[in-house]
Amino acid sequence: MTDSIKHPSLATLLVHGGRDALARDEPVASPLYQSVNFQHPVGTAEGMRYPRYGNNPTAELVQRRLALLEGAEAGLVLASGQGATACALLALLRAGDHLLSSSWIYGGTHQLVAKELPAMGIATTLVDPTESRGWRRRLRKTTRAIFLETPVNPTGRVLDLKPVTMLAKELGLALVVDSTFATPVAFRPIEHGADVVIHSATKFLNGHHDVIAGAVLGTAAYIEEVRQKMIVWGQAPDPFACWLLERGLKTLDVRVKRATENTMRVALWCATRPELSAVLYPGLPSHPDHEIALATLDGMGAMMAIVHRGGGEAITKMLRRLELITHAPSLGGVDTLVSEPRFSSHDHLSPEERAALGVPDGFLRISVGIEDPDDIIADLDHALRG
Ligand SMILES: *Cc1c(COP(=O)(O)O)cnc(C)c1O
């Protein structure tokens, strides 16, 4: 980036990472190469550019930046977080291999691990990540990789990577971490021993509710394998999505920090409300993973949840009274959004099964945005009084 700053900090990398110092007359905003085709030298296959190959210059810039942010050798941006997870796992596993996966994973990932991979001859086992020695006990001779997500949706559970990393290193398994909820501002899994990092860039990385994209970070050799899967399965992103993502990344540090401050305020306020039986936020001492979150995360993030004593009916009534906060299934953007897992990620389960997973009816996930926290609280207050 520059010669004068040898070790630029994360906030600086977010703005400048992957771009050389600007030459005379170069635009400050990075150019959008909204082009599918590029002139190609005659008589060689070298250096052919085509967006499906992940080498449109706009994609390449955001890929370089994300790799710097995560401390990875290389990165790849894909059409969605789901596309990123699918290609990342397909690049690691062949028919006959076995995958250990945390059972606390995003719904789309669960579908991939529980249905699609087994249909391709890849065996998978879901593991409760808090079970002592749970990973080791389910190992097979054919186990090749471990997949987990932390912090976990929607309960905010934070996993300790240390024992998993030790196991993966001991046996030469690839450790793959979906770090969507943390973002590199709060947690960089490679620094903690992970081999592969996955993001749904649709969430915090872009942060403005207007891009669908995903990312995979890892060694250059591995990312090349993921790229081959992306090319064949058609999971490359559009250049404009990459351009919006690059722009969104510039403010990631300030957005995450502001949203995190807001979330602490909202969580503390919710903890005083008699209507609520639980407030789940790793930043609260009452959260089961508060200590591990303090020890491993640089910030507690902007995802929290509440449980209403009145159950699902009370939450429905509350949601109808919200005016500022929007009921919408996604997360990680500048607007505060709320969603009920019983109608989204957990709708295929019975109320009893949901309660067993820590998501009883009356549970509401809140993705806190960057609005004024007093206004967010006023909206919740008005809705709860309904
Ligand atoms: C949303 C999400 C995904 C899937 O990402 P898309 O961009 O919607 O495809 C994967 N993992 C986590 C943790 C998510 O929140």
Image (tube, helix red, strand yellow):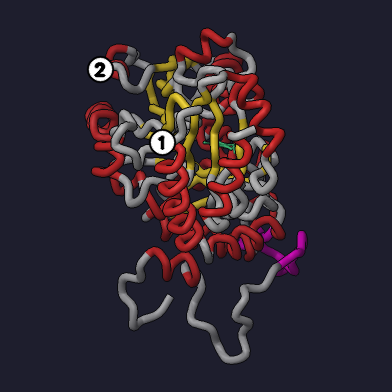
Q: Magenta segment range?
A: 33-49
The location of residue 12, given as percent across then percent down, is 42, 70
Q: CA distance from mark 1 to mark 2?
A: 31 Å
74 horizontally vs 139: left or right: right
- Closer to the N terminus: mark 1 or mark 2? 2
Q: Is the N terminus in the top left, top right, bottom left or bottom right quadrant? A: bottom left
Q: Secondary structure at mark 1?
A: loop
Residue 369 drawn above or below residue 329: below
304 horizontally vs 347: left or right: left
Q: Which residue is mark 2?
A: 132
Queried whether the magenta region covers residue 130, the answer comes back as no
Answer few, some or many: residues within 10 Å of disc 2's Cα (few below 14, many 20 plus, some between 14 and 19). Answer: few
Q: Disc 2 beta carbon < 8 A from ligand 1?
A: no
* Residue 133 visible in the picture: yes
Residue at the image point whose x is 49% and y is 77% from the top = 20
Q: What amino acid type is highlighted by mark number 1?
A: Ala
